[in-house]
Image (spheres, rainbow, N blue to C red):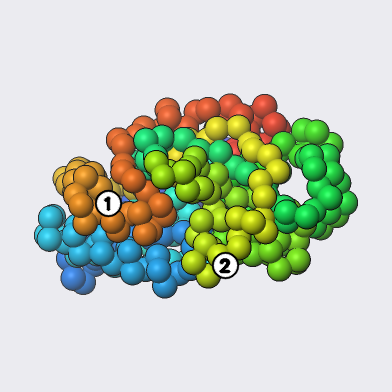
Amino acid sequence: MKKLFILCISVFIILVACGDKDARLAKANRRLGSKSNPIKMFFVPSLEAGKVVQSGEAIAEFLRKETGYHFKVAVPTSYAAVIEALGTYQADIAWLPTYAYVLAKQKYDAEVKLMTVRNGLNKYRGQFVVRAESDIKKLEDINGKIVAYTDAASTSGYIYPSAILKQRGISPKDHVFAGGHPQAILAVYSGRADVAYTYWSPENAEGKPMDAREKLANTHPDIFAKIRILDFTDWIPNDTVTFRRGLPPELDSRVADALFSFAASEAGKATLKTLYDIDGLDRASDADYDVVRTTLKAMNMDPATMLK
């Protein structure tokens, strides 16, 4: 009798939780896209927030004209905050890095819609960078050093490079979370850290390096001379445009199509280039990111386990 009572209570709690989730979803979707309930589009703070917001507003304005929906742009203080916003209906669309998307899918059943393209590639690598005069010549030399990460949910700025060091038994002395790719490089440039983990992309058609150092070239003209690349991670599928679960199907389709059109327009190309060095957008599916899950499991970094 006691077991039956406990079972009934458990079922009741589950039903209440499901009902509460359905109610929150219905509220989030009520008149979504109107002035009173705009579509909330979030961006990760991998670059200076003001610049990201400016580009985000340009995207939102195009989408408003193209779809008739209203949008609101935000840049929270961390990648994790963007993921949580997708799960709590505070964000409807998020421009998420690879690993952040994998977590959002695992935890909140978020849906990838589009994948970024840079220099004709829909994949990239992480890089380890050090000061030019550093005595760090190989990855093993990172033992006992101070490293600068970008964010704990960054694939190239934390997850992949950390996994490589773990595999090889390399133990840094300490670490800092810099808050973005340029900031991590600046930590090495200024001497706060010995090594930084950031993204790498190939040179452009003119032979100009397009990795994370490029974002600092205007303010620090000697950045390529002072900071050198030590090594690389494996290839990683590019970052995403991700939608939260349960968006109204018509809205979902119209916004995804409009984003794809925006990326193909001249104004869109210029805006996306300024935003995250994006050259275009491809259609994407969750299966495109299975390679990340496979790699993480091989490194004993299964997202399902890490979320517990």
Residue 164, placed above or below residue 275:
above
Which residue is more in the foreground, 240 or 85? 240
Indicate the secondary structure of the residue bearing disc 2: loop
Indicate the secondary structure of the residue bearing disc 1: helix
CA distance separating discs 1 and 2: 26 Å
Label 1 crowding class (10 Å Cα cut-off): few <14, some 14-19, many 20+? some
Report which residue position mark 2 lands on. Answer: 220
Left or right of 82, for residue 57:
left
What residue lies at 83% left-to-right and 39% top-to-bottom?
140
What residue lies at 51% left-to-right and 48% top-to-bottom?
209
The picture places residue 202, in percent across and down from the top left corner, at 49, 40
In the image, what residue type sits under mark 1?
Answer: Lys
What residue lies at 81% left-to-right and 47% top-to-bottom?
136
What residue lies at 13% left-to-right and 55% top-to-bottom?
67
Report which residue position mark 1 lands on. Answer: 269
Q: Which mark is residue 106?
A: none
Left or right of 214, for residue 161:
right
Label 2 crowding class (10 Å Cα cut-off): few <14, some 14-19, many 20+? some
Which residue is more in the foreground, 183 or 25? 183
For marks 1 and 2 on the same chain, the one whose residue lies earlier in the sequence: 2
Name, please, the residue furthest toward the right.
144
Which residue is more in the foreground, 303 or 203? 203
